[in-house]
Image (spheres, grey):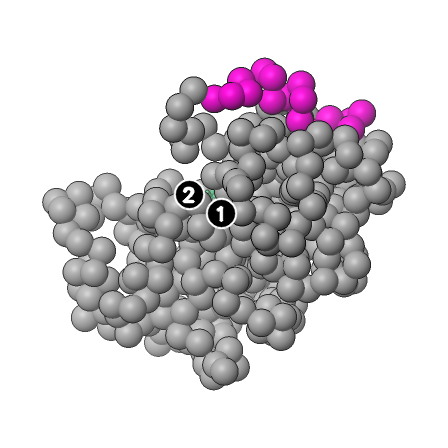
Amino acid sequence: RKDLLGLRQLTPEEINLILDTAVPMKEIIGRKIKKTPTLRGRSMVTLFYENSTRTRASFELAAKFLSADTIGLAASGSSVAKGESLRDTGLTLTAMGVDVVVMRHPASGAAEYLAKCIPAAVINAGDGTHEHPTQALLDLFTIREKKGSLAGLKVAIVGDILHSRVARSNIWGLSKLGAEVRVAGPSTLLPPELEQLGVKVFTEVEAALEGVDVVNVLRIQLERQQQGLFPTLREYSRLFGINQKRLQLTAPDALIMHPGPMNRGVEIDPQVAYGSRSVINEQVTNGVAVRMALLYLLTGGEYHALAH
Ligand code: CP
């Protein structure tokens, strides 16, 4: 494959190849001197039309740990602010010899569009409400590392599913690797197509949490709410917030995950977020390893490993 646009397109074998490749990458992160020459001579641009802390920083670190050359462009500081189109921006970067463009964009489908316009590899770092494949890959990696395998696990995704590209990519990835996926949220934040994706849908969080092995708590995306928020944050917290009491409904060794950034005290109680079952910080570390693996597979020695 030239690009990583979403998990919908990937086979279980391709997903497992990325996760397997991330295992030795994580060992590099654990070393005192993290740099390896693997991608020397390669280059990566992060092109972000939306804000980010984790995704952008971890891609830039991942590339640096593998000795690729990197630059970061934010839409506000580039010629995008003067009206330059996405296609022309991509072609300009390609003319400079860039091998990989990592892009976040508010429009669903923007990554696919860019991938068709330019010969460089495009990695989707989140497009609208469509997909956030690298977040889902790091989530899968974290679960697999803790539980050994995804097959047969019960995973609850709780929160603002309607606006969540993280939820969509997780649903594709978890289902392809054999997990049972439950989604829970207020009916106002559940998209209509969920049943067709083969997931179990709950409008009461307690029923969704019963006996699950993993709870992935999503952020309420205030910036994407078109009209007034219903339920309100206070109502949401009372009805769906993951707190110590609700945690007792899960399997005793259930993992608590959150892609970040968190609205602490809204969708997740601080005692849960920083409690013994939380793997939220490990998700962040694993994000660097998974992004190193992707950069390696798309531009490195095994470029054709992801090709059909
Ligand atoms: N999880 C995630 O995408 O975080 P950022 O918005 O900080 O990149």
Q: Is residue 21 visible?
A: no
Query: Is 236 one of the magenta-colored residues?
Result: yes
On the image, numbered disc 1 is attached to which residue? 165
Q: Earlier in the sequence, mark 2 or mark 1?
A: 2
- Against 170, residue 23 (above or below) is below
- The type of residue carrying mark 1 is Arg
Q: Residue 69: image x %, image y %?
A: 35, 66
Taking the image as shown, residue 45 lies to the left or right of residue 289, namely left
- Taking depth in this image into account, of 149 and 198 the one nearest to the observer is 198
- Label 2 neighbourhood size at 10 Å, few (<14), some (14-19), many (20+)? some
- Taking depth in this image into account, of 229 and 259 the one nearest to the observer is 229
- Against 146, residue 9 (above or below) is below
Q: Which mark is residue 52?
A: 2
Which of the image's four quarters has the N terminus?
A: bottom left
Q: Main secondary structure of the magenta part?
A: helix
Taking the image as shown, residue 230 lies to the left or right of residue 278, namely left
Q: Residue 139: image x %, image y %?
A: 62, 53
- Taking depth in this image into account, of 120 and 201 the one nearest to the observer is 201
Give me the residue at 73% from left, 26% from top: 243
Query: Magenta part of the protein: which range?
Result: 229-246
- Label 1 neighbourhood size at 10 Å, few (<14), some (14-19), many (20+)? many
Query: Is 231 one of the magenta-colored residues?
Result: yes
- The type of residue carrying mark 2 is Ser
* Structural distance between the alpha carbons of marks 2 and 1: 14 Å
Looking at the rendering, which quadrant does residue 255 occupy? Answer: top right
Tags 2 and 1 touching, CB below 8 Å: no
- Is disc 2's CB within 8 Å of ligand 1? yes
Give me the residue at 45% from left, 57% from top: 59
Secondary element at tag 1: helix
Give me the residue at 45% from left, 66% from top: 4
Give me the residue at 41% from left, 58% from top: 124
